[in-house]
Image (cartoon, rainbow, N blue to C red):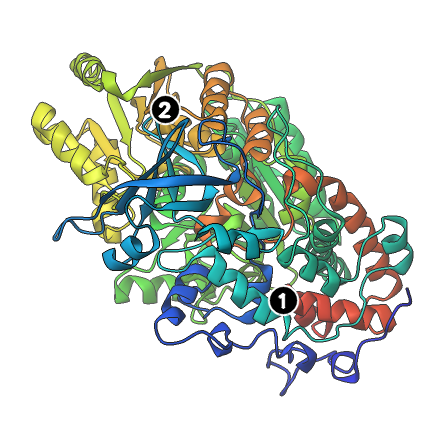
Amino acid sequence: MTDTPAPSDAAEDDGPARGPDAAPLRPSILDPLFALARTLPGIGPKMAPMIERLLGTPEQPARIVDLLFHLPQGGVARQLKGSIAEAPPGEPVTVGVTVVSHRPAQPGAGRRPHRVLVEDPTGDIALVFFGMPRARVEKMLPLGAHRYVSGRIDLWDGHRQMVHPSRITDEAGLAALPAVEPIYGATEGLTSRAISKLAHAALDRLPILPEWQDPAWLERHALPPFADALRAEHRPEEAPAPRREDGTPPPRTAARRRLAYDEILASQLALALLRARQRRKPGRRNAGDGRLAGRIEAALPFGLTSAQTRAVAEIRADLASERRMLRLLQGDVGSGKTAVALLAVASAVEAGRQAALMAPTEILARQHFERLGPMAGPLRLRLMTGRDRAAERRATLGDLAAGRIDVLVGTHALFQDSVVFRDLGLAVVDEQHRFGVHQRLALGAKGEAVDFLVMTATPIPRTLALTFFGDMDVSVLDEKPAGRQPIKTLTIPVERIDEVVAGLERALARGERAYWICPLVAESEFIDLAAAQERFEDLRRHFGEAVGLIHGKMPGPEKDAAMERFAAGGTKVLVSTTVVEVGVDVREATIMVIEHAERFGLAQLHQLRGRVGRGSAASSCLLLYRGPLGQVARARLEMMRESEDGFRLAEEDLRLRGEGEVLGTRQSGLAAFRLASLETDADLLEAARDDARLVVERDPGLRGARGRALRVLLYLFERDAAIRLLGAG
């Protein structure tokens, strides 16, 4: 295989498109892939909204590339997989059944499903259809008829069910099917088979792309070309192997490994370009003589741990060098990141410069401000959020520009053009994965040679640190301050909820406070989860005005007021969704109840548990679950009982759930991998990082033959920010 040069439109795209501030143009060779999905044949007015619901976002309609990257989750072989009783839960199967009865949704019952009971000699199963007209279901599955159904059997309250079978056919239809039918993640009203047809239509639009991978690497690992790999995934010739008995996935196909490596390389190359640019830019010394930091450290009510001392030394060395700092400070819940950040800020202020601390929410920004205040000593702190009154805001902006503010604490409001620093030297960003790289760059543009300290309370496995923070140096706080009490963690079936409420009553009588976490704000129409509103009303019947409520759909002032009442003791029980997950600090809270704990990931459960145990009193975390538990959910809850080590839990969470969930990126919009999985492809990460580093060393402008092809790769996987860096110095 030879290294094919990129077409001229890709090769010449090495700078801004229209003037110095315009975004560079995407190579026109990729235009067919970024055309809207609704332009494909077969997508009419009825289907278009379903495609948008499945693959689009409010900001970005679904495109053909989204369809191509929506790979099958599995495949169903045409041959039968035994009987209902023998069919393995969670794996795609085909079974022959007889239709026994219909239970259509009753009028006015909301979006209840239409259920069809089918059976074979070994047992029965419910086929579940949401949003499908009754007449259509009854036509597909007439009473008494023999049919072959394919899909995934799941257990729900102990009963077998198959939601939206991927296919339903008779004897003649079964004989005409392909050897393997791919199974796609679907949405209401849009079947896997319909998605398969659209994916095949999208494959017909695939242009001939330049080869961006090293030919020797492809040959050594027997990996196919990119287009061949996509076709092989969407048109499988063999059904994928099931998971092994120990729960680990089977080996990936060569096609899937090729696609995974492409995506990982795009990610690592973008990070390598960002790091190279950061290193190229001249820095400024941002460390003074230590007088302010010394005074602040001496006044702290606790001594620094050895991990904190080490992190402070690493940060101070960065600040004192002529090279720009880009450092990740990661620490488990309660490991003391705030004190480390404050000492870093003090170093910058000693050098005559200003600092900014940016948090993802107003609650956290306000809390940082209040927590830093008593420790900040001579530093002049100010808080700025989107809700400041006009007069307050004008005063803050004036003082900031004049240098009368040393440290500005705030939210996204800090990005605004009107925010002008006299001399910004250090930016501290809390929970970096809630922001994009471009937002970090926007904050850095507000000063000359700004140093960056990025903090996260999410313990991150090494593979994820390389993936999302590969452009940064890393400091780890792996000790807890002295005096922190262990948190007793119990798992309790939801049927014993009355005992939990009785125990809560005794705790409140002793003056304790408690969080009660629910996974949703409103009752789900599809899954029977407790709603925060409903639990709030139920607990109010027991405890009256002592119960408060907070959730993500409340306006900001209401959320802040609810948190402040709880922190001040005005309410004793705070019913909440996961909005309290990161950073919220009420030291008097000693009880954490997490309802439907089986629905949360390990990292999130650990973050929530970390909201208690922050004072000197003994604390407990009660994990309420609804059985029967699946293998993964049971493993998660057992790990929570066994360990308070956030880094160990994060590694286990990555193994059980994947990278997008561990960082919360699926909820927050950061693009998790779509084609790669760190569970199976982590070994490709180091190779891609080395490859990206070599590329940037040898061809920093990506102007050579492979470099031009790699530009196409970056655009294909929407790492456009990296392309902008090439012309930005």
Query: Horizontal placement of 404 versus 274: left or right?
Result: left
Write the residue at 57% across / 74% down: 34
- Residue 370, given in percent of the width and then of the height, sits at 36, 40
Q: Compare marks 2 and 1 and give the one earlier in the sequence.
A: 2
Q: Is residue 276 above or below residue 472?
A: below
Residue 673 appears in the picture as rendered: no
In this rendering, the label closer to the viewer, 2 or 1? 1
Label 1 sits on residue: 721
Q: In the rendered structure, which amino acid carries the disc numbered 1? A: Ala
Q: Nearer the viewer, residue 371 or 518?
A: 518
Q: Nearer the viewer, residue 714 or 475?
A: 714
Crowding at mark 2 (Cα within 10 Å: few <14, some 14-19, many 20+): many
Q: Nearer the viewer, residue 448 or 94?
A: 94
**SS label for mark 1:** helix
- Quarter in which the C terminus is drawn: bottom right
Residue 247 appears in the picture as rendered: yes
Task: Tell me, for residue 612, which label it has, or none.
Answer: 2
- Residue 268, given in percent of the width and then of the height, sits at 72, 54
Query: Horizontal placement of 549 versus 665: left or right?
Result: left
Q: Is residue 391 above or below residue 247?
A: below
How many dots with numbers? Answer: 2
Crowding at mark 1 (Cα within 10 Å: few <14, some 14-19, many 20+): many
**SS label for mark 2:** loop
Write the residue at 40% across / 71% down: 48
Find the distance from the CA under tag 2 to the CA under tag 1. Answer: 39 Å
